[in-house]
Image (cartoon, rainbow, N blue to C red):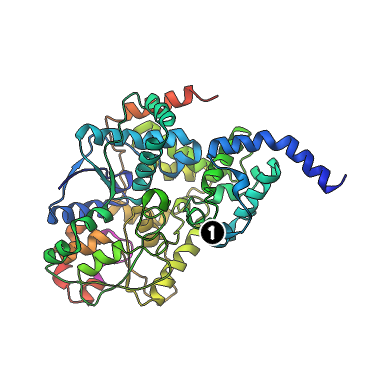
């Protein structure tokens, strides 16, 4: 399978592990990624806060680039994925809006390229493919699969299997041998959009709630599919003296470990909270 | 003057404002029947000065000042939990966006630093086509008067190659600048 790849700004900086591990895992699963040439920022929250049409034009430019390649497009970042998918939906249902956006773009927009999240893309290859590719089953590793907001909402547009209790990420992790726990905070917000503002205290509270929830459910780690959730959970966890913080992984990092790659290849050493110790404890020390 | 006449006057003054909110957001404020589900599930509600449900009530009553001059519209994280749970399918985050846009136009921004963040974010995208996280954080800290916020986290991020010192270059930047220029030209 060949698909256009829209990394988004975070995957070239604070979310670089997601880029490294995502590319490796896709290669292993015979998914060929072709990075969109000259892709630009989707505008994220700041654009839709500012203006609806601008917020559609910035992602639409990237969708038009995928159109030019004649490929569907995948966005690993949940926020980018959300903006691309919402844009595609709005422009498909409102010809007047589409015309306005085309005027801003100065290029045609056809809406042919479909948008897939990386979770959805891996899931579509199938649990069986993940199982077959697994060289180092993640047996006994208890994980809390964290979807956050933008991968599942608005449900009417993104069409997740279940907006309050999605399963896609859990199934992929289980196929690699891990044990996803049942926990009630799968789709609760981590507050990442305020992480850099002076409302950091709100973010710390939301992160603590997620970490407590995951720990109460018996998880040894939280697994994300979003660079904003990851940065937030990895850098805004406040631990009581003597307590160990909960490692936070991208799902592609854990798949990469299961597929036989080393932690270094996958970028796991770049986390703020050490992610290698837990892997060593489970006996995958040759990976770290 | 009785409360009833005040509300009548509020509506007389505020009807145009409410129509503008409905136009910008694509939502009907009369759809809401004030069940409060949006507020019950809102992760930010505890930090807001007005409950999300009340924002809709203000709009139903035409109370412009109350709907605009609060921290709530700026603290909405657009997590969409309320949209997922609303029995009337009101997209409240879209209404929050509309109110922010009107508040900016009228110079009534209560959470100036949140607005500053969004402005700097878009200015960065406009400049380079892609977001330059380092310059965004430095610019924000400088202009919000908290120079050393999160400074302790910076050295490790540099060492791990997670912060780009030089902004990334893309030939798409020129096109993004044109998008912004055309968008600005059509603003009223």
Is residue A276 located in the magenta-colored stretch of the structure? yes
Q: Is residue A187 left or right of A133 when viewed as pictured?
A: right
Q: Is residue B125 at least partly visible in the picture? A: no
Q: Nearer the viewer, residue B133 or A134?
A: A134
Q: Residue furthest right?
A: B1
Q: Which residue is mark 1?
A: B42
The residue segment tinted magenta is A269-277
Subunit of mark 1? Answer: B
Identify the image quadrant of the N terminus of chain B: top right
Horizontal and vertical percent position of residue A97: 43, 31
Horizontal and vertical percent position of residue B16: 67, 33
Identify the image quadrant of the C terminus of chain B: top right
Is residue B83 located in the magenta-colored stretch of the structure? no
Horizontal and vertical percent position of residue A2: 16, 45
Name the quadrant containing residue A24.
Answer: bottom left
Q: Is residue A57 left or right of A124 when viewed as pictured?
A: right
């Amino acid at each position: 399978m060949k698909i256009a790849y829209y990394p988004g700004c975070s995957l070239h900086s604070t979310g670089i592990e997601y880029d490294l591990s995502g590319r490796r895992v896709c290669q292993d699963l015979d998914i060929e990624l072709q990075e969109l040439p000259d892709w630009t920022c989707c505008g994220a929250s700041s654009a839709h806060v500012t203006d609806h049409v601008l917020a559609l034009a910035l992602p639409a430019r990237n969708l038009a680039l995928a159109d030019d390649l004649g490929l569907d497009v995948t966005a690993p970042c949940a926020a980018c994925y959300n903006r691309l998918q919402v844009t595609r939906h709005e422009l498909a249902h409102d010809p007047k809006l589409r015309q306005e956006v085309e005027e801003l773009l100065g290029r045609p927009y056809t809406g042919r390229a479909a948008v897939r999240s990386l979770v959805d893309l891996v899931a579509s290859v199938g649990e069986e493919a993940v199982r077959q590719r697994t060289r180092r089953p993640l047996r006994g590793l208890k994980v809390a699969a964290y979807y956050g907001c933008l991968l599942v909402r608005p449900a009417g547009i993104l069409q997740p299997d279940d907006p309050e209790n999605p399963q896609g990420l859990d199934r992929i992790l289980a196929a690699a041998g891990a044990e996803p726990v049942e926990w009630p905070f799968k789709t609760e917000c981590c507050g990442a959009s305020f992480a850099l503002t002076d409302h950091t205290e709100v973010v710390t509270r939301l992160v603590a709630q997620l970490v407590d929830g995951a720990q109460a459910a018996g998880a040894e780690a939280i697994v994300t599919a979003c660079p904003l959730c990851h940065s937030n959970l990895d850098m805004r966890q406040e631990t009581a003296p003597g307590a160990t913080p909960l490692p936070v992984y991208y799902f592609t990092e854990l798949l990469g470990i299961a597929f036989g790659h080393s932690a270094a290849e996958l970028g796991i050493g770049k986390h703020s909270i050490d992610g290698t110790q837990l892997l060593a404890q489970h006996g995958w020390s040759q990976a770290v | 003057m009785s409360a009833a006449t005040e509300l009548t006057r509020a509506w007389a003054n505020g009807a145009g404002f409410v129509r503008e909110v409905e136009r910008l957001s694509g939502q009907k404020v009369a759809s809401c029947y004030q069940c409060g589900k949006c507020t019950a599930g809102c992760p930010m509600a505890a930090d807001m000065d007005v409950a999300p449900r009340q924002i809709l009530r203000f709009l139903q009553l035409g109370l412009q000042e109350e709907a605009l001059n609060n921290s709530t519209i700026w603290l909405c994280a657009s997590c969409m939990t309320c949209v997922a749970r609303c029995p009337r399918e009101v997209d409240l985050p879209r209404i929050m966006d509309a109110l922010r846009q009107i508040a900016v136009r009228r110079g009534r921004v209560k959470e100036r630093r949140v607005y500053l963040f969004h402005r700097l974010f878009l200015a960065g995208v406009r400049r380079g086509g892609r977001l330059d996280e380092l310059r965004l954080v430095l610019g924000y800290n400088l202009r919000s008067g908290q120079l050393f916020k999160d400074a302790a986290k910076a050295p490790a991020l540099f060492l791990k190659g997670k912060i780009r010192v030089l902004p990334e270059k893309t030939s798409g930047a020129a096109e993004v600048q044109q998008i912004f220029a055309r968008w600005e030209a059509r603003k009223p």
